[in-house]
Amino acid sequence: MRFHAYWRSFLLGETHGDAFLNWNSGFGSNFLGDIGTYLSSPFDLLVVLFPADRIEIALYVVTAAKITAAGAAMALLLLRLRPGPWPVAAVLGTAYALSGWTFNYGATVPMWLDGLVAFPLLCLVGEWARTGRRPVLGPLVVALAWIANFYTAYMATLGAAVFLVVRLLTAEETATARRRLAGALRAARGVLIGIGLAAPLVVVIFLATKVADPTPETTFAPAAWTDVLARFLPATASVASPALFIGTPALAIALTLPFNRSVAPRVRAGWTAAVVLVTLSLQWEPTHLVWHAGASPNGIPYRQTFVLCGLLLIAAWFSGAGGVPRPVALLGGGALLGILAWAARGSIDIDRWTFPAFGASAALALAAVLLALLGVRRNTTRPTDPDRPSDPVHTPDPARVPPAGSTPVRWRAARVLPVLAVALLVAAQAGEAVVTGKRIEEQQRDKVSWSPRIGPWHTAVADEVARADGWPRYRTDPGEVPGGNDVLLVGGQGPDYYSSLTADVTSRTLASLGFGYYAKGRHPVTLDNPVTDALFSIGTRVRSTPKGPLRQDRAPRATVSAATTPVPPLVTVRPSAHPPAASGDSAFAVQERLLGASVYELPPVARTGRTLTARCPAGSQAWLWAPEYKGSAALAGEPPVDFEGKPPSVRAPMRALGAVPASGEVRIALGPEGRPRLPRQSVGCLVPDRLDTAVRRLTDTGATRVRATGHTVTAELPQGSTGTAVLAVPRISGWSCAAGDAEPRPARAYGGLVAVPLDGRETTVTCSFRPPGLRLGGAVGAAALLALLATGILHRRRARR
């Protein structure tokens, strides 16, 4: 939701950055990569239709629209595969859209829902390629899927490849090896052209992942088969096993396919094999890595499960589209369903609602089958229309008058019973979906991290940030606000930010300076420290305190204030090409090294039990740097301060403990949760006069004027400036700079920040950011466009012949 709030502001021209760079987060981050990862779906454009204070409703609408589109796309695919009653196709399409994957994974990560939409569409593209139709529209659909969300589109493309292989081997139109090869080649051409059209965005994302903060390597551990089977049942939730629920009626129909002799043997064998092999592929590490592009993901290891859900529903359609399966098939499918439920009974994922919902749905499905069978029997016993061949699947035309000698009541019953059967099928599917969605939501509230809904706290901070904003003369940091990435709601130019593409340079640079983070480094958080404020030109800092407890349904009101202090400009001048040598490896020493001045007193620290003691100048400010510490710390006479370190996922920021008393004695009482882990130089005392002197020096020698437009910063420097101009932005890949009229070159680094060498002759410095891979992706996209045009021309010529 937070990204969507920023996306709305961006589309309406209300942000400082542009499509290349986001100044609001991470002190300047690659926004095009984030667009492609989180916001490039066409559905996300709907946010502009909603006011800024209704962004939550906008995201609900976007999510519902994606789920609806996925169901419609699946129903369309099913009707394209073979003739059948459209109400049944609609029910199966809805079962796909409201699968356990949607409730458990997709709804909590809305950009993954684009993969749910993409899978049936890509299967439809495979059908077009197999039959030699729509050679231009097919690649465009592929491109749209990969642009909307390349991550799940990759999985959907693999699933569509499985679909195409089965269709090539089982469909009558491709009964010869030559036709199969031609269909496969047409499909490969369409996929390559489509991905090529998406390359300007996909290449940018791919290269951004290469420089993103790495997460710890994950070793895949397959779920217990009992848990895998349990996930076919309703009201089950887990991130450690595949969400395979598609509804008991739909699953029962799918399980009849191996026994349904009204379906061609090769079709039965092909789709049964596909479902079984894809299920096994979820549990085998080599194929698990193939599904996830070679890297086992952190968190949810079964993100590709929506593909198996789709294949199961396709199998159900082939078994049920021709009418109610015969009793042998029904008994075989029912037996498999019963064995599955019995084998899953001991799973830890089984909820108290699972078997009641399963039993009720199965009973309704059985009633629907009996009604449908009765309707077929009555339909076959009525006199036939001489102008129409006998077909037990079709019901009588309501416009026709019953032939002479027929019974009107029986004839009407033959019309009504199939409708009642479909109604019961819908009731069974809908009831299970409601129960499953409700139970998953209730369980996730206890297990999944959450952010409060937008409330008065956010509004008050946003208003204060807008009032105090002085960009690009200085930054405004909105401070700590409730929820992850909520700084995207309130504005400013602080470091707080979450993205799977957070650059490793950003994470490492900020962590070394005493900033904290979440999500193993991909979510830097703000640091309320005067030294880092000077380093990053944070002239205004907004601080807020809630007036009530933080609730999940709404953020409370808060007391908000803003403090403005003199800081150096965004571009400063340093005398050398590199920071001076550090006096230690602590965050205090790294801050001093980047500032170019000694502003802390770094005393020896003695530790006795749970007490730290040291001596510092009276009146200085005591700071504790303990990134891995979880617990409280209190300077004598001051209130305790909390630290939330939890390595490797959470790093606690440096925190101020209070003013050093006149005696100069620093005595810190610790209240750890577990065994405390502290760095050697954990205490530093900031001397305000020293910092003021350093700030004045950097201001006097820094830029006299700074302009920022989108992804470009231009600074005017004092005459004769030599050494290195330093832009207070992490030196992520993509920055290029030039002094004066020189040709732009890749920016250098100064302590992790963007730097430009100076020779004393130039008085201006210009730095611009271009996402890496944009030029390469553009070239690939242009080539793909030419290939698409050539394909269209050749297809038209063949059609004319």
Image (cartoon, helix red, strand yellow):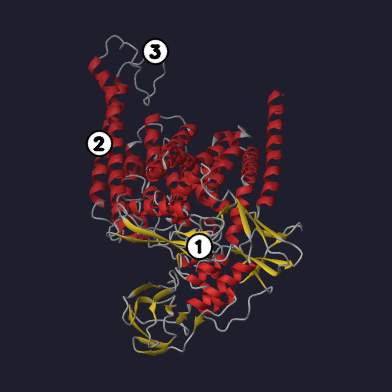
As rendered, which of 50 and 425 lies closer to the eye? 50
Q: Earlier in the sequence, mark 2 or mark 1?
A: 2
Classify residue 743 by image quadrant: bottom right
Which residue matches tag 1? 539
Looking at the image, is 801 positioned above or below residue 424? above
Instruction: Kindly state the secondary structure of the residue where label 2 is placed.
Output: helix
Q: Are marks 3 and 2 in contact (CB under 8 Å)?
A: no
The answer for how far apart the CA atoms under marks 2 and 1 are is 71 Å
- The residue drawn where x is 61% and y is 32% is 134
**What residue is shown at x 71% (from left), y 32% (from top)?**
794
Q: Is residue 463 left or right of residue 135?
A: left
| Label placed on residue 367 | 2
How many marks overall?
A: 3
Left or right, 768 with reference to 161: right
How far is disc 1 from disc 3 in space, using C-alphas?
89 Å
Q: Name the amino acid type tagged 1.
A: Gly
Q: Earlier in the sequence, mark 3 or mark 2?
A: 2
Q: Measured from the top left, where is residue 703 in percent x and y? A: 64, 62
